[in-house]
Image (cartoon, rainbow, N blue to C red):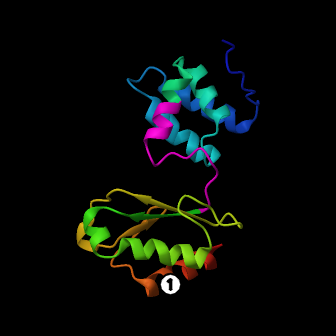
Amino acid sequence: MEALKIHIPDNEQYRELGAYIESVRNMPGPLINVLHKAQGIFGYLPMEVQAFISRELDIPLSTVYGVVTFYNFFSMTPRGKYVINVCMGTACYVKGAGKVVDYFKDELKVGEGETTEDNLFTLTTARCFGACGLAPVLMVNEDVYGHVDRKKVTEILKKYRSLG
């Protein structure tokens, strides 16, 4: 069986990631931290980046891929500038999170897991944020919004569109 060959470019982003990996190489279990750093640098984790991490940490590519695909925080496709993540945990679901997702789908003209044509928004869902008292709740990047309804969806989108 032939090994997978992936071209890894030599550019500033890879040099930055390589320097970070070197700084954490001797720490126990650095993979998650390296993946977070890589996603911060590249915006997502394509196979080339995963192969680079695999090589630099001397761990199997299948291990890197397994972690990337297991955790919903990590993405293998480009995401928008603003990632809208709607909680679908029990409390949020019962209080209308499904409708909130539908409102965003209608307003943005995208499906769940998709990015708008202008690369401004990506719509995702997650199991639970631990903010059940604010149900239904969502996050836009690191900003938390609670008690979300159709009116709030419109306000949230207007705010982030104005920021560009």
Asked whether, in this view, residue 26 is left or right of residue 119, the answer is left
Q: Position of residue 37 (x, y in %)?
A: 53, 40
- 18 or 156, which is in the foreground? 156
Extreme front residue here? 1
Q: Which residue is mark 1?
A: 155
Q: Residue 13's quadrant in the figure?
A: top right
Residue 54: image x %, image y %?
Answer: 57, 23
Is disc 1 placed on a helix, strand or loop? helix
Residue interval drawn in magenta: 65-81
**Picture residue at 60% right of the left edge, 60% below the top:** 114
What is the x, y in percent for residue 131? 27, 65
Amino acid type, callout 1: Glu
Task: Residue 164 in the image: state x and y as whole percent.
Answer: 66, 72
Q: Is residue 81 above or below residue 36?
A: below
Q: Is residue 92 left or right of residue 105?
A: left
Residue 79 in magenta stretch = yes
Secondary structure mostly seen in magenta is loop
- 137 in magenta: no
Number of marks drawn: 1
